[in-house]
């Protein structure tokens, strides 16, 4: 008798937990979807990333010049779009520092675009070694930008 009532109350508890989980699941799903959603700036960054990945081998291949130039010019466009979008300053940053934070973001993005132009010129002129070393600097500029603006 005693054990039956305990098992019934266990059953009730399990049912109640199940109901709570079912009711909460749409909210959990929404929160996850929001986390995964790309911001407009994030989309431009993804484009820069995929260009960078495709360029890695191409910059060493002078016979792939036209394909390489096409990617470089597309990336310049994505850099310019990232410039126009910019991230919101973090809530923890004092208002007096917002202007500097935002201006420095755009200056760092312009450095990326300028470096893409350096690579473009080297590729156009068939200077493969210069193109390779200029390409490597793009990775450094990315890391420098992310150190400050995308710390996670
Ligand atoms: C060639 C250079 C760069 C590449 C390939 C690159 C790549 C990326 C990638 C893959 C992401 C993750 C996107 C996502 O899934 O949300 C990202 C995010 C971000 N990057 Fe870059 N990045 C570059 C340069 C920079 C620079 C120079 C800065 C700052 C001046 C910067 C600031 C940011 C910020 C703020 C985010 C977060 C965007 C968001 O989610 O709203 N990135 N970047």
Image (cartoon, helix red, strand yellow):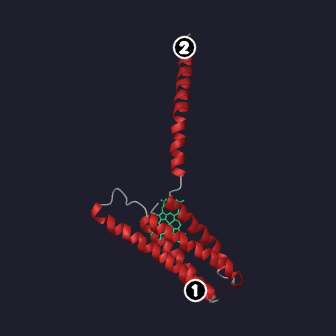
At 69% from the left and 82% from the top, the residue drawn is 61
Disc 2 on helix, strand or loop? Answer: helix
On screen, residue 114 above or below 30: below
Q: Residues within 10 Å of mark 2 (few under 14, many from 20)?
A: few
Q: Which residue occupies the foreground of this view, 147 or 72? A: 72
On screen, residue 92 above or below 75: above
Marks 2/1: CA–CA distance: 81 Å
| Mark 1 residue's CB less than 8 Å from ligand 1 | no
Residue 107 placement: quadrant: bottom left
| Mark 2 residue's CB less than 8 Å from ligand 1 | no
Disc 1: which residue: 121
In the rendering, at what x and y percent does residue 81 appear? 50, 67
> Which mark's residue is nearer the viewer, 2 or 1?
1
Q: Given the current orientation, which residue lies at the most extreme left position?
A: 96
At 37% from the left and 70% from the top, the residue drawn is 103
Q: Which residue occupies the foreground of this view, 72 or 142? A: 72
At 54% from the left and 84% from the top, the residue drawn is 118
Going from the N terminus, do you reach mark 2 or mark 1 first?
2
In the rendering, at what x and y percent does residue 28 appear? 52, 40
Residue 21 placement: quadrant: top right
Q: Is residue 62 left or right of residue 89?
A: right
Disc 2: which residue: 5
Disc 1 on helix, strand or loop? Answer: helix
Q: Is residue 94 left or right of residue 61?
A: left
């Amino acid at each position: 008798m005693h054990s039956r009532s305990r098992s019934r109350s266990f059953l009730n508890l399990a049912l109640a937990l199940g109901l709570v989980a079912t009711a909460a699941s749409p909210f959990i799903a929404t929160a996850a979807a929001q986390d995964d959603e790309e911001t407009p700036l994030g989309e431009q960054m993804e484009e820069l990333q995929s260009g960078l990945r495709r360029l890695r081998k191409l910059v060493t291949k002078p016979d792939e010049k036209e394909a390489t130039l096409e990617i470089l010019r597309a990336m310049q466009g994505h850099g310019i779009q990232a410039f126009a979008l910019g991230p919101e300053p973090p809530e923890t940053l004092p208002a007096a520092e917002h202007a500097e934070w935002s201006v420095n973001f755009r200056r760092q993005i312009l450095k990326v675009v300028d470096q893409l132009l350096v690579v473009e010129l080297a590729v156009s002129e068939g200077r493969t070694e210069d193109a390779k070393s200029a390409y490597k600097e793009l990775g450094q500029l990315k890391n420098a930008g992310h150190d400050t603006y995308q710390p996670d």
